[in-house]
Amino acid sequence: MGKIEWAMWANEQALAAGLIYATGGIVGVAGQFRGWQFAAFGIAAGVFVCLLEYPRSKRGKGTSVERTGQYCFTVCVNAFGPLTRNYYVRAFLHAALCVPGGFMLATVLGCVCLGIASLIYLSAAIHGEHWEPILPRTEPPKRVGDSIKEPPQNPPPRPPPELRRKKADKLETAAYDNPMSVTVNE
Amino acid sequence: MGNWIINHGLSAFILVVWMGINIFLFVYYYLFYDQGPQFEYTRELLGSALPWARAPAAVLNFNCMLILLPVCRNLLSLLRGSFICCGRTMRKQLDKNLTFHKLVAYMIALMTAVHTVAHLLNAEWYTNSFQGQYGPLAGNLSMLDDSSELKTTYLNPVRSNSTTPTLLVFTTIAGLTGVVITLALILMITSSMEVIRRSYYEVFWYTHHLFIIFFAGLVFHGAGRIVRSQQVTDPPHNTSFCEDQPENWGKKPECPIPQFAGGFPQTWMWVIGPMIIYLCERLLRFIRYMQPVSYRKIVIRPSKVLELQLVKPGFKMAVGQYVFLNCPAISQLEWHPFTMTSAPEEDFFSVHIRSVGDWTEDLIKMVENLPEGGQGPKMAVDGPFGTASEDVFDYEVSMLVGAGIGVTPFASILKSIWYKFKDSDPKLRTKRIYFYWLCRETYAFEWFADLLQVLEKEMEERGMRDFLTYKLYLTGWDQSHVNHAMVHFDKDTDIITGLKQKTSYGRPNWDKEFEQVRQENPSSVVGTFLCGPQALAKDLEKKCVKYSDVDPRKTKFYFNKENF
């Protein structure tokens, strides 16, 4: 698996984990389970993780595919600078967020999934990956050089006149006029 | 509307049948557990969370049975071969096997979610029942213990005050296997997202093998028999009379102590068949892996394309089929698909491999370092597997569209045409072929241009210029191409390919092309075959629908897509 960018998979896993964490939390709170406080935390953590993970990073190699409507999220996440660009921070953050989920059944699955995502992010960080925002490229329009406005100063290079002259009998097929007049037996 | 029915009717029908079965199973089992008298007391503890858990379980059984079948490619080849009598529409459905696999996977994911949420509620409510939070009836039911002296059987799996829902889940077979297989499922799904699959195939392939854990856990998931139903006792327990007086159970003749027993696990009955079929499929791949394959010729083509000509005893192919190659020196476990570029009439089979990822790059590097005339690395071949291009000769008129390296199946077809022509094969039903090749760069043309040149000459010699009409489109043109073309516009042959047919620049105008085909073939059935990007597939599919006519006297277009 030489060229794998672990962060890509970690991102998918973390997004899924966030959703599962939040869903488990909702069930825990709505059903008024024992330990519902952990479930409430699960909802908050799950939503936060989803928001953090929604914008995909730019790939190191190859074309990056954006998620629909991720531009605003990209801008927000990018605003935090090294906190969000560094994957060690993310790995640690996910590991910390997932721990409270282990205390209640409804959020246990979210906890484990987020934990796995944290491990994959750790692997990504060890491989030196980091998060890059996908921003629309503003290329300057192709400018034609100014020199095109000036007429050429010199004629195009041509071989010396002696070599250029056409034989008299081929005058009709010649593409240009002779620089020197020619007669048949020159 | 009629055009849509022709092109998508059978697929839609199969989907409706599948969805119908799902809905039926869901509703039937929901009602079974919601209204069945044997679950009256269980429902006392769990409410409607019981049927909400059991109904998706039934749907899951059905779909877990189905999910293995579309990926048994040898089975599908067998079916495709035996459907020769049933027409091409039936066989085309088998091309969509991966789409169906994904659809079933989505249903499994959805039902797992519903099932898990319902069981979260169940675990919580069982625990609460035991702790007496739901009244005397629930409390008494929960107090029933598995005891031979008292002659009682338990109903509530929670047996002690210190059991929490988490403990309940992790100490029962059902709970533990449930968590493990759900985790496996989540990992499988996240690594199968399109982004991961297209760019990092190995992650997808290896992680997907978690399905072994999934099925193992699934089979044992019901072994604990945790869903308990009421058994008929002698004398019978009159539920409606007795439920208000649980303290009198065993004391009144109408109310003997109710007995409960766990349900017999059924999942294995659903999945054992496909599991065996899939096992046979993998065994077959292993057998093919052991069979010897030798190299006839190795050619390194321009733009990092590798041509391998291989010979395998007993190997028979048809046009446009593909094989899976495995090179143990690069990776023991990976099998990668490649379309064959040789015709069945030749005594070898060839593949053209482009450098796209780890495996292909390693192979090309290995081959580049070989001594002159040496045998290549040991290669195992599984296949051949049939795809849509087998049907090319069944249509009177065929439109073949290949984008970039997607032209490979058509190389096989065109070579086969050439051979059939030479032998005047009467099996050739095709009267006309339109071939469109879309390519971004010029230098990828070379290995294919040779073939086209030969065909061009052959057709002219036999005076059959109309048989094959081919158009080449250079989609990645820029100013230098334009300049070059302007300077050489009066040359007889094309400046890029050296063929008589001129290369066009930019993308084809499909409306014009379809219109031309329709005009030149007024009452024919036209098969459109594409090997290329998804966007183009959507485009062509729409055009096929647009230009088809239900009227049998007019032209009909059928769309077929290669997929890997």
Image (spheres, coloured by chain):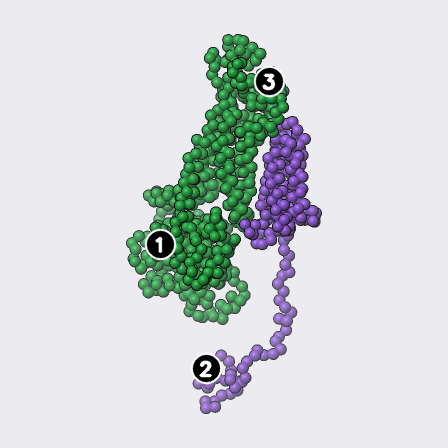
Chain colours: A purple, B green
Q: What's the residue at 55%, 40% (across, down)?
A: B187
Q: Nearer the viewer, mark 3 or mark 2?
A: 3
Q: Residues within 10 Å of mark 2 (few under 14, many from 20)?
A: few
Q: Is residue B390 left or right of residue B154?
A: left
Q: Is residue B501 left or right of residue B481?
A: left
- Check disc 3 and give the amino acid type: Gly
Q: What's the residue at 47%, 16% (across, down)?
A: B232
- Check disc 2 and give the amino acid type: Glu
**N-term-proximal mark, 3 vs 1:** 3
Where in the figure is residue B406, as x and y percent of width and height? Answer: 46, 54
Residue identified by numbered label 2:
A172
Q: Is residue B8 left or right of residue A88?
A: left
Q: What's the residue at 56%, 37% (across, down)?
A: B183
- Check disc 1 and give the amino acid type: Pro
Disc 1 from disc 2: Cα separation:
58 Å
Q: Is residue B378 visible?
A: yes
Residue identified by numbered label 3:
B139
A186 versus B47 height, above or below: below
Residue identified by numbered label 1:
B344
Assign a secondary structure to mark 1: loop
Q: Residue furthest top?
A: B252
Q: What's the residue at 48%, 60% (across, down)?
A: B369
Dot 1 falls on which chain?
B
Q: Is residue B94 visible?
A: no
